[in-house]
Amino acid sequence: MKQKIAIVGTGKMGKALAHGFLNKKIIKPSQLILTKPDLSDLSEFAKNGVQVTTDNKIAVQKADIVIFAVKPQVMSEVLREVQPVIKNTQLIISIAAGTTIRKITKFIGKGGVIVRVMPNLCTQIGESVSGWTTNKKLTKAQQKLVIEILEAVGTQVYISKENLINAVTAISGSGPAYFFYLANALEEAGVSLGLPKKIAANLANQTLIGSGLLLKSTNKTTKDLISSVASKGGTTEAALKIFNEQNLTQKFLYGVKAAAERAETLNSFNNSN
């Protein structure tokens, strides 16, 4: 693409996005502008020709596409800072959790094109799934740019209703932690059965990695895959019977709902500030 991209707030997620753009070669280093209070953390980018600055306003002024990757607690402050230099011709993308399109519109005006995205930690390895939504100002050309940007770090899913971003947050935004939780639980179970901790961790982690790759490579449903492992009267069926007796699925649902409700709380809090 020919456009210049500014990433305002280049923390872990911002750096992951930057690496993705450069690795996929969707832009040249000279087309990328990164901001952060401490530039020492961005030295690797600067050495490769990426523009780095501590001044958010300068970055926004130079860019055609502005990605806000700051923490939600400081989003209002940053928007207020750059408000004088934002133009309606710019494509604004926000990955700040709990910051609604309505809130951003208060700062940049009703004519602005705003895209709200919920990526996840797997952005760091180019395997994120990013749910995104937008206001009605997005053109078809800009839609192609959004998709190209998000697919530089994984896959993307368009969400037609912004209020469903809370569900996206609970499922895929927080989702990696659920898998890490399961890996840890499997590791602890292995240790309790007598395995050395290192071996238990290796077995648990690689089982989840392999299972994920298998799920990605097949057209079978998750229920089909469960059935393919759980033969009648076998070891897997014995474990699944206990999980069902303990109503594990329902308990998992309670946890995911709690995440979605917390996302709604953040929306309400950030929208009022």
Image: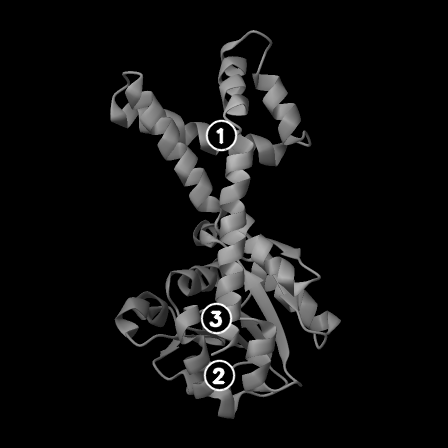
Give the residue pinned by disc 2: 60
Depth check, mark 1 against mark 3: the one in front is 3
Q: Secondary structure at mark 3?
A: helix
Depth check, mark 3 against mark 2: the one in front is 3
Marks 1 & 3, CB-CB < 8 Å contact: no
Q: Secondary structure at mark 1?
A: helix
Q: Where residue 146 appears, x then y in whole percent?
A: 62, 66
Q: Quadrant of the N terminus?
A: bottom right
- Residue 151 visible in the shown view: no
Name the residue: 61% across, 70% down: 115
The amino acid sitting under disc 1 is Gly
CA–CA distance between discs 1 and 3?
A: 40 Å
Q: Earlier in the sequence, mark 1 or mark 2?
A: 2
Q: Earlier in the sequence, mark 1 or mark 3?
A: 1
Name the residue: 53% across, 56% down: 261
Give the residue pinned by disc 1: 210
The amino acid sitting under disc 3 is Phe
Name the residue: 43% across, 59% down: 16
What's the colour scheme?
A: one colour
CA–CA distance between discs 1 and 2?
A: 42 Å
Label 3, residues with CA under 10 Å away: few <14, some 14-19, many ≥20: few
The amino acid sitting under disc 2 is Val
Give the residue pinned by disc 3: 269
